[in-house]
Image (cartoon, grey):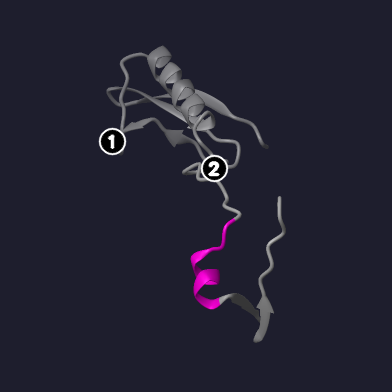
Amino acid sequence: MNGVDARSREILGGYHGEFRKVHKAAWEVVCLGGTPCVFETAQEAEVAAWRALRSHLCNDIVGSGAKASSGKSKAEELFGSIFKRGKRIQVERKKGA
């Protein structure tokens, strides 16, 4: 199922907040610096889990945000062509592409 969810789970000494991502079936515990957080109430744990899930979903997915360049790559500047299956393919750039 491709759904997201969050919950609190009772543990010894408090509650863990847990959330499930769209692409994973396993529950993940809310952590701070790699250590699972222990909350005093179930409500605090569930709210923290929903916030952690929202933070994950609203994060930058594409990485650094660097734009693709239409200029020659460093490899093309050095070699001037690309090799595919042992054959040399000359690289051509189209204007406006």
Residue for badge 2 = 62
**Residue under the point 54% across and 39% down:** 61
**Residue stretch in magenta:** 71-79
Q: Position of residue 55 (x, y in %)?
A: 47, 27
Q: Main secondary structure of the magenta part?
A: helix
Going by the image, does 38 lie left or right of 45? left
Going by the image, does 61 lie left or right of 49? right
**Residue 85 can be seen, yes or no:** no
| Amino acid bearing label 2 | Val
Q: Are marks 1 and 2 in contact (CB under 8 Å)?
A: no
Of residues 83 and 72, the one nearer the viewer is 72
Q: Is residue 35 magenta?
A: no
Residue for badge 1 = 33
**Residue under the point 56% across and 62% down:** 72
Of residues 42 and 55, the one nearer the viewer is 55
**Residue under the point 66% across and 83% down:** 88
Going by the image, does 89 lie left or right of 26? right
| Amino acid bearing label 1 | Gly
Question: Which quadrant of the figure has residue 70?
Answer: bottom right
Q: Is residue 92 above or below residue 33?
A: below
Secondary structure found at label 1:
loop
Q: Position of residue 41 (x, y in %)?
A: 36, 13
Q: Is residue 73 magenta?
A: yes
